[in-house]
């Protein structure tokens, strides 16, 4: 009996690269799927939404060294429903706000599109016996915003557009004109959500990619989309229409170029 246990141990060393107790490492980067999932879940931002939003999170965990790891989260929404005009101040302002809001219901004016992919990147370091956030970068439209690290990562998501801010004030900033405050995004602390990540929502590495948008259950939610192709993220566009929209204006941004490697 002892001999059989010893043989199993030796076979484990042979099959699992020296660690018979190790878990699968699908992207072969030296971190097991479970370790990657645990790190990603630990640093996933708390998301504050104005209203209920349906979204999925896919992620990448890239090992830079034994003490440094970069986690990239992509928040995927079915669509971007366009800008929200928020006007406040005296009665005239509020009436003007209603007028503008009706005006921007037109898709040609409100920059709405199908599919919306938003990114947060957290660099974590192993210090003092534990993993800590070192840098947090949030992609907002075409820029990156660096947030203060080493505190709980909180993100305020604007209504419809899903742009991400580190505070409500920053989101609703806007500008003042003739005594009216005008903003093109609106945040409200209606719902605070800590997303629960699927262990199989890991996209792997560029060398060993895993196109989890082509696998169930995500392929059912976002048909014909890819985490690694150059196409724009189009939410639920049928395949024949995606062909026309790949370089078009009516889909969200690309996903594949946000991964670190
Ligand atoms: Ca891995
Ligand atoms: Ca990885």
Image (spheres, rainbow, N blue to C red):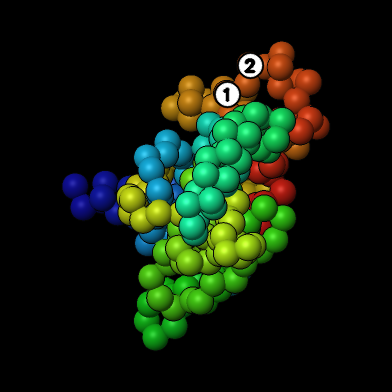
Using the image, determine if residue 57 lies above or below residue 188.
Answer: above
Q: Position of residue 8 (x, y in %)?
A: 33, 48
Q: Nearer the viewer, residue 90 or 85?
A: 90
Distance from Cα at disc 1 to Cα at disc 2 = 6 Å
Residue at 72% x, 55% y is 142
Q: Is residue 246 left or right of residue 160?
A: right
Q: Is there any visible trace of residue 194 in the rendered image?
A: no
To which quarter of the image does residue 70 belong?
bottom right
Q: Nearer the viewer, residue 147 or 219?
A: 147
Q: Position of residue 89 (x, y in %)?
A: 49, 59
Residue at 53% x, 56% y is 164
Using the image, determine if residue 166 lies above or below residue 206.
Answer: below
Q: Position of residue 167 (x, y in %)?
A: 46, 66
Residue at 67% x, 17% y is 239
CB within 8 Å, label 1 to label 2: yes
Q: Is there any visible trace of residue 159 in the rendered image?
A: yes
Q: Residue furthest bottom?
A: 128
From the image, tell me which residue sits under label 1: 236
Using the image, determine if residue 113 lies above or below residue 243.
Answer: below
Q: Is residue 60 left or right of residue 245?
A: left
From the image, tell me which residue sits under label 2: 238
Disc 1 secondary structure class = loop
Q: Is residue 21 left or right of residue 141?
A: left
Q: Is residue 237 left or right of residue 229?
A: left
């Amino acid at each position: 009996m002892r001999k059989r246990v010893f043989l199993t141990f030796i076979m484990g060393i042979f099959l699992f690269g020296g660690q018979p107790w190790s878990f699968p490492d699908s992207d072969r980067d030296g971190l097991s799927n479970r370790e990657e999932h645990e790190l990603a879940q630990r640093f996933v931002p708390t998301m504050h939404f104005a209203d209920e939003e349906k979204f999925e999170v896919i992620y990448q965990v890239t090992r830079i060294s034994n003490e440094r790891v970069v986690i990239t989260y992509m928040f995927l929404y079915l669509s971007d429903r366009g800008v929200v005009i928020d006007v406040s101040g005296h009665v005239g302002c509020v009436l003007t706000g209603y007028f503008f809001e009706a005006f921007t219901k037109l898709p040609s004016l409100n920059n709405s599109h199908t599919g919306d992919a938003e990114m947060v990147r957290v660099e974590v370091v192993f210090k003092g016996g534990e993993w800590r956030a070192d840098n947090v970068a949030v992609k907002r439209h075409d820029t990156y915003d660096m947030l203060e690290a080493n505190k709980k990562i909180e993100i305020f998501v604007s209504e419809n557009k899903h742009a991400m801010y580190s505070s409500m004030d920053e989101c609703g900033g806007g500008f003042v004109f003739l005594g009216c405050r005008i903003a093109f995004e609106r945040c409200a602390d209606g719902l605070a959500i800590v997303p629960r990540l699927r262990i199989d929502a890991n996209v792997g590495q560029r060398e060993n990619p895993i196109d989890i948008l082509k696998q169930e259950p995500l392929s059912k939610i976002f048909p014909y989309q890819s985490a690694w192709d150059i196409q724009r993220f189009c939410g639920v566009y049928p395949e024949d229409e995606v062909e026309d929209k790949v370089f078009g204006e009516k889909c969200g941004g690309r996903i594949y170029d946000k991964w670190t490697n």
